[in-house]
Amino acid sequence: MTGNDMDVDFRNRIYNRALEEQNSNLWNFKRYYTAASFWSAVDVGTDAYMALAGAVITYGLAWRTVPVWIMATLSLSVAAISIFKGNRKPGKRAEKIHTLGRNYQKLYDEIQDFIELDLKDDDREKEWIRNRFDKLASERHDLKAEATLSGIWYRWLKWRRGDEIYEEAATTDKERDLLDPEGFEQEDSEGEDES
């Protein structure tokens, strides 16, 4: 095996690992955005419900046309929602989760740039490529340690969107063209094999 063949083999291994990292980041930022949208809807929905319930209670107290049991039920539901919002803080949770999703998306884009601009650049040294890849992988592990979502968001996203998510990226052989249509090929190594 020549030095050039070893370099191509090294780059292919890094390329495959980078695709796996990119695929993981794709699923993560989609999950985080889905969860952030859910918690944002919960926050807005509960605010709207509490405003409507408050209006009905006020109207009922002012005009005495709403039955007492309805006003009591609305009052208890507003109290329960207030306790829930005080405990779960859906607005803050949505912001935090959205920020994490944005960080995963940024890392996804950085890995895409690494593949397109650095890994395919023959002038980049192996040590530099390895260090850059390790740094990107370390960033993902740091993000994973920062906060986690339950697997329900992954399962829901997989159920809801299925393989549609791979329109943006993939790591299987069939779907690699969607991620990187050119692939990672070295013309020099093919030409040397024929000689």
Image: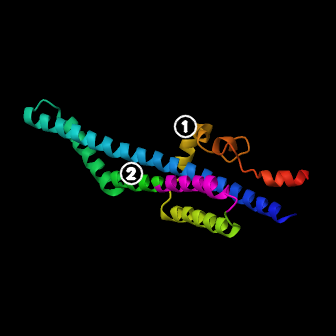
Overall secondary structure of the magenta stretch?
A: helix
Mark 1 belongs to which amino acid? Answer: Arg
Marking on residue 140: none
Residue under label 1, please give it. Answer: 160
* Residues at marks 1 and 2 touching, judged by CB atoms closer than 8 Å: no
**Residue 183 position within the rendered picture, expressed as x and y whole percent measured from the top left:** 71, 47
Name the residue located 47 percent from the left edge and 53 percent from the top edge.
101
- Mark closer to the chain start, 1 or 2: 2
**Residue 191 position within the rendered picture, expressed as x and y whole percent measured from the top left:** 85, 51
Residue 16 falls in image quadrant = bottom right
**Residue 59 position within the rendered picture, expressed as x and y whole percent measured from the top left:** 13, 34
Name the secondary structure under disc 1: helix
Residue under label 2, please give it. Answer: 94
Mark 2 belongs to which amino acid? Answer: Ala
Name the residue located 57 percent from the left edge and 53 percent from the top edge.
25
Residue numbers of the magenta segment: 103-123
Task: Tell me, yes or no, whether the highlighted magenta stretch contains residue 119.
Answer: yes
Q: Is residue 122 visible?
A: yes
Viewer-side residue, 122 vs 89: 122
Quadrant (top left, top right, bottom left, bottom right) of the N terminus: bottom right
